[in-house]
Amino acid sequence: MLAADGSVRWAQWSTQAFFDERGQPLEFQSVGRDVTELKDAADLLRQKEEHLAHLSRLAVMGEMVAGIAHELSQPLHAATTFAEAARRHLESGRATAPHHAIDCCTEISASIQRTVEIIHRLREFTRASAVNIEVLDLNDVVRGAIDLMLYEIRRVNARLHVDLAGGLPPIEGDRIQIEQVCVNLLKNACDALIGAPPGKGHIQITTTQVDGRLRLVIKDSGCGLGDADPARIFDAFYSTKPDGMGMGLSLCKSIAEAHNMQLGFAVNDGEPGLTFHVTLPPAKTLQP
Amino acid sequence: VSDQPVIFVVDDDNQVRKAVMALVGAMGVETRGFVSAEEFLAEYDGRRPA
């Protein structure tokens, strides 16, 4: 509605119909209510949530910056070494030298490509972007999150077991936010494994389809709940980690709610650690 | 069994390991790569100079 002062107002209308004994409509009763302020408040809340999600992504990456620097320097270091190998081959003047040098050049390209991909992923993940709902391949999003977390997983000496089901239906959602759920759950699994005895740290990531819905399971063999209150684990600012902000899981929860996903966890049966599971509906619209 | 020395390269990063092996190989020395120290120790019999 356009108000007298030219501003746009939002109204919510409820309409009721009344019928006589023979079922003929007698009258309609409509009640209109100005909900502009309610809608503004909801919009503001959504903006704040987006902002908070962005800050949390920055914080997670900030915590892992040393690892990320290492992840970036590895392929560059490999490229330099391959270049040096190619130079030595060519200088040797052996008949096989060009063949070896060409192999080295292929590896240099692959190494630099890997650096480019890591930078691209980082930029995507840390960018402040409006929510963009699109049709996604869950496995693709999970692999993206694993790429970002590889160093962290290695840092805590965890063995990663990945079992992604083929032929999953597409899902619908914001890529970055769903990736953020995966990253936060993986980070949580890594944190739970700090101090685990060598060879005992395992993280298992599984995607499956259950009753037409998609299921992502992240299981760790870490320290479990400890002193944490299971009822408060998804609460904001609730953390049992010495330097924890208590944002990771609570954000997972709000992202899950916005995406009509169910998020839960269970204490592992008969073995240490926790298992988090996310259940997602398949995309409603059928798009390629 | 040859008497030629072998350089064993242990690195869990595939690209880095391959790169070091390529460089050492370019120097004309035989190399063998392993993903982990455990894998290397399981394979290495200690007979050849390393």
Image: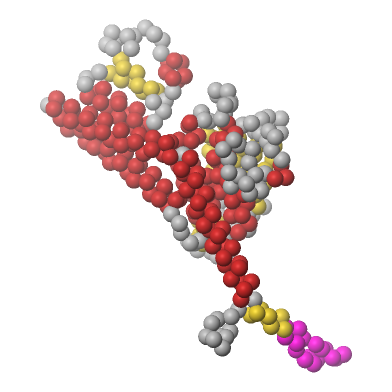
**In the image, which residues are magenta?**
A15-30
In the rendered image, residue A277, in percent from the top left (x then y), is placed at 63, 45
- The residue shown at (30%, 33%) is A77
Asked whether the viewer can see residue A10, the reply is: yes
Q: Residue furthest front?
A: A5
- Depth check: A90 or A173 in front? A173
- The residue shown at (55%, 60%) is A48
- Depth check: A15 or B43 in front? A15
In the rendered image, residue A188, in percent from the top left (x then y), is placed at 58, 39
> Majority secondary structure of the magenta segment?
strand
Magenta segment: does it hold A257? Answer: no
- Depth check: A142 or A48 in front? A48
Q: Is residue A50 above or below residue A87?
A: below
The quarter of the picture where residue A256 lies is: bottom right
Q: Residue furthest right?
A: A21
In the rendered image, residue B23, in percent from the top left (x then y), is placed at 25, 26
Total numbered circles: 0
The quarter of the picture where residue A267 lies is: top right
Left or right of A253? Residue A132 is left
Q: How is the image coloured?
A: secondary structure
Magenta segment: does it hold A16? Answer: yes
Quarter of the N terminus of chain A within the rendering: bottom right
In the rendered image, residue B42, in percent from the top left (x then y), is placed at 46, 16
- The residue shown at (55%, 23%) is A198
- The residue shown at (52%, 30%) is A156
Left or right of B26? Residue A273 is right
Asked whether the viewer can see residue A205, the reply is: no
